[in-house]
Image (cartoon, grey):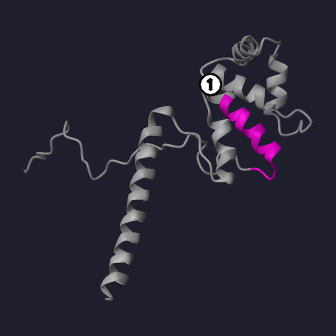
Amino acid sequence: MARDRRDGATLDLLSWEPPPVAVRFAEGAVRAVSVAQRLSLAVATTLREADLSREEVAARMGNYLGEEVSKNMLDAYASQARDAHNISLARAFALLHATGDARILGSELKGFGLAVIADRYLAAVEEAMWAEREEQARQKRLAARHRWKGA
């Protein structure tokens, strides 16, 4: 009987996929009809997946903002039924501070063609922009050469 001789310690480079760069919820995870409902779902998902209780999140948010934030407020922000209680941008930042989860900010930006990315990737984005600019310049140079030589 033949033995499987694959090395379990060696990585299969062809099966590797890069992790997502943009900080946002998975496609369809916070699907709703309105922005307010999507934000409610985003708050609810963030709170559900946090390693903290809602009371702890509220306390951290309050410390960040310098004002009281209660568990009841978080419950209201997370409820789609309470559409008059949407989370403000300041409180969304406080939620990010409390949980470390920036997906609530990144997911809504996708509709504007923008993304939230980790700071460590900014240099890679800048490098890609330079490479794109260099390719555009190369194409213009080749077009000029083509016109000059009359080909």
Residue depicted at x 39% and y 45%: 18
Is 39 located above or below residue 114 in the figure? above
What residue is disc 1 on?
50
Image position of 138 (left or right of 87): left
Is 150 located above or below residue 6 in the figure? below
Residue 7 pos. (x, y %): 15, 41
Image position of 105 (left or right of 69): left
Q: Residue furthest left?
A: 1
Task: Count the labels in the image.
Answer: 1
Q: Verify whether residue 63 appears in magenta.
A: no
Residue depicted at x 73% and y 17%: 61
> Which quadrant holds the C terminus?
bottom left
- Give the residues drawn in magenta, as a range: 32-46
Q: Verify whether residue 37 appears in magenta.
A: yes
Residue 25 pos. (x, y %): 61, 42
Residue 39 pos. (x, y %): 76, 40
Q: Main secondary structure of the magenta part?
A: helix
Q: Residue furthest right?
A: 84
Considering depth in this image, is 129 or 28 the residue closer to the camera?
129
Residue depicted at x 64% and y 46%: 29
For the residue labelled by badge 1, is the local secondary structure a helix, a strand or a loop? loop
Q: Residues within 10 Å of mark 1 (few under 14, many from 20)?
A: some
- Res 106 quadrant in image: top right
Considering depth in this image, is 143 or 15 the residue closer to the camera?
143
Considering depth in this image, is 112 or 85 the residue closer to the camera?
112
Q: Amino acid at mark 1?
A: Ala
Residue depicted at x 71% and y 38%: 42
Is 62 located above or below residue 109 in the figure? above
Q: Residue furthest bottom?
A: 151
